[in-house]
Structure formats: C-alpha cells, structure tokens
Image (cartoon, helix red, strand yellow):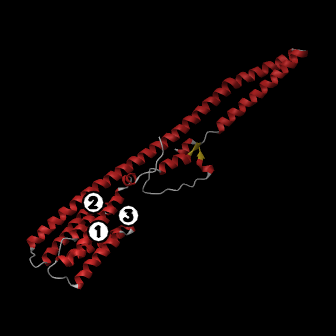
C-alpha cells in the first residue's frame, strides 16, 4: 500500500465538532452581514446614521466575541468568562434586530444556540435560549404595526429557529463525550494489558530461574561433588580428565547461578509505557510525562 498525503476532503473529515461549529458560525455571520450591507437599498426610507452604526457595531462585536478564545476553550475556561462572552453575543444579536427592525439578528441567535451546550449546563442553556427568543420577540413591539400577538409569533419563530441547532449541537456533544469515555476506557485497558504482559514476563522469568536453580543447579552440584570424589579415586591420565570435567562443571554451575541471579534481579516493569497509554485517553489535555529512569522501572505491585 503506497503512502499518500491526506487530501483536503480527508482533512475536513478529521475536523472536530468544535471546528464545524466555528466555520458554521462564520458562514452564518457572513449570511447575516450581506443583508445588512444591502439593507439601506431595500428600505423605502433610508436608515439613520445612528441605526447603521448600531447594527454594524452589533455585527462586529458579535464576530469578535465569537472568535474569542473562550468559545474554543469551552468548559476549560471559567464560568464567568463563558457567561460574559455569551452575554456580549446575545446583546449584539439583539442590537442587530433592534436597529434594523427585522429578523436578521435571528441568524446570529442560531449561532448562539449552537454553542450553548458547549458552554453552559443543559438547564441553563435552555433558559438562556428562551430568554434570547423572548428578547428577539420583544423587537416586534418596537415596529409601528407591532403588538403582543406579533411578539408572540416572533418569539415562537425565534425559539423554533434556535431549537434545531441547539438539539443538534447537544447530540454532537453527547457523542464527543461518549467517544472520549470510550477512549479513556480503552487506554485503561491497554495500560492494564501492558502491566499484565510485564507481570506475565516476570512470572515466566521467575519460573525459568527456579527451574534452572532447582533442576540444573542441583544436578550440576551433584555432578561436581561426584567428580571431586572421582578425582581422588583416579590416578594419572584419568585423574587429569576428571579434574578438567570437575572444573568445567564448577564453571557451568557458576554460570547457571549468575543467570538465575540476573533473571531474579530483572523483575521490574516499565511504568512509563503504561502511563503514556493512560495519558492518551485524555484528549482534552496535553499531558507531558517527565519520569526519572529510576522511577520508570518499579515492581509490579507499585506499578499497578
């Protein structure tokens, strides 16, 4: 299989829901700004300079608040900052509808509804969306033909428009959390599997060292003793060969004991590898591990 660089479509498919919300919000803002630019040409009476300054200030302020880092950080930022940014965006959307005497601000309210689940708890998000829809409906009272019935229609219309992106964003948030939980559990499983593999390796080395010590070591010890006795009972050339065999047996016994000792000393597991697997299960944070070499290798019980 040949290597290839990821195409633009592949990179788009790798976007996170937060990235989709960001570009969705920018697109909706552009769609709202275009009517604002054409608004003076579409009205029978030219708007006042104060009205134009008002709606353009609201549109620009909404964009600056939407691009604030708090929107991207979401739950990692303090609550008061999230509330402040949402309040600025809501007031800006209301200002656009108020100064244009139209429902253009409802488009911006859809963006607010889409990011609410990522910024506030569900109950507070629903309350915020209802209050925002009521504020948008109240703009109907400011029109010459406005009334309470028209304000109710505006409220229901704005609440219906914001309800769909809110529910879709809420479902996306639940999916992200479920995927994060699955990733965390998978990382814990991999880390446990790594420790289990290390423990199995250590247990196997201990078993092999015990077998070497109990079987081979004892037989070599018996062989060395028998050769020592044989060296005293033989003479001349036979004694020379027996002494050589006894020397080889003693060397072999020493090597076996050294191997057994080394295998029993190598009973430490690599804690760093398991911690790295656990850190991969926290996608919201960038974890840097700095573990001394002496601490990275430890006994199995302490590593667990």
Q: Give the spatial CA distance, label 1 vs label 3.
A: 19 Å
Residue 285 or residue 65, whichever sits in front = 65
Q: Which residue is disc 3 drawn over? A: 72
- Residue 13, percent across and down? 36, 52
Mark 2 residue element: helix
Vertical placement of residue 32 versus 168, above or below: below
Q: Mark 1 vs mark 3: give the one in front.
A: 1
Q: Which residue is disc 1 drawn over? A: 30
Q: Mark 2 vs mark 3: give the one in front.
A: 3
Mark 1 residue element: helix
Q: Give the spatial CA distance, label 1 vs label 2.
A: 28 Å
Q: Kindly indicate the quadrant of the structure image that contains residue 12.
A: bottom left
Q: Residues within 10 Å of mark 2 (few under 14, many from 20)?
A: few
Q: Are marks 1 and 2 in contact (CB under 8 Å)?
A: no
Query: Which of the two labelled residues, at mark 2 and mark 3, occupies the earlier sequence position?
Result: 3
Q: Which residue is disc 2 drawn over? A: 122
Mark 3 residue element: helix
- Residue 117, percent across and down? 29, 60
Q: Give the spatial CA distance, label 2 vs label 3.
A: 18 Å
Residue 84 or residue 34, whichever sits in front = 34
Query: Which of the two labelled residues, at mark 1 and mark 2, occupies the earlier sequence position?
Result: 1
Residue 109 or residue 43, whichever sits in front = 43
Is residue 14 left or right of 258 when viewed as pictured?
Answer: left
């Amino acid at each position: 299989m040949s290597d290839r660089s990821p195409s633009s479509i592949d990179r788009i498919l790798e976007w996170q829901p937060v990235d989709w919300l960001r570009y969705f919000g920018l697109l909706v803002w552009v769609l709202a700004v275009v009517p604002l630019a054409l608004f003076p040409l579409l009205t029978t009476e030219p708007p006042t300079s104060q009205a134009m300054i008002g709606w353009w200030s609201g549109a620009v302020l909404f964009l600056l608040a939407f691009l604030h880092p708090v929107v991207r950080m979401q739950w990692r930022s303090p609550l008061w900052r999230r509330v402040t940014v949402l309040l600025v965006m809501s007031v800006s959307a209301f200002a656009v509808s108020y100064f244009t005497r139209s429902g253009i601000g409802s488009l911006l309210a859809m963006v607010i509804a889409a990011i609410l689940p990522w910024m506030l708890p569900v109950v507070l998000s629903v309350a915020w969306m209802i209050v925002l829809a009521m504020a948008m409906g109240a703009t109907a009272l400011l029109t010459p033909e406005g009334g309470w019935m028209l304000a109710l229609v505006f409220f229901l219309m704005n609440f219906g428009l914001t309800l769909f992106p809110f529910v879709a964003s809420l479902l996306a948030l639940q999916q992200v959390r479920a995927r994060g939980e699955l990733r965390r559990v998978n990382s814990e499983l991999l880390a446990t599997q790594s420790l289990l593999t290390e423990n199995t390796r250590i247990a196997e080395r201990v078993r092999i060292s015990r077998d070497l010590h109990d079987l081979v070591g004892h037989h070599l010890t018996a062989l060395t003793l028998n050769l020592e006795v044989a060296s005293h009972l033989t003479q001349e050339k036979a004694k020379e060969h027996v002494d050589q065999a006894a020397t080889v047996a003693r060397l072999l016994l020493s090597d076996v004991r050294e191997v057994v000792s080394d295998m029993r000393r190598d009973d430490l597991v690599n804690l760093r590898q398991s911690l790295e697997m656990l850190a991969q299960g926290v996608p919201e944070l960038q974890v840097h591990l700095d573990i001394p070499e002496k601490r990275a290798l430890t006994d199995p019980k302490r590593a667990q």
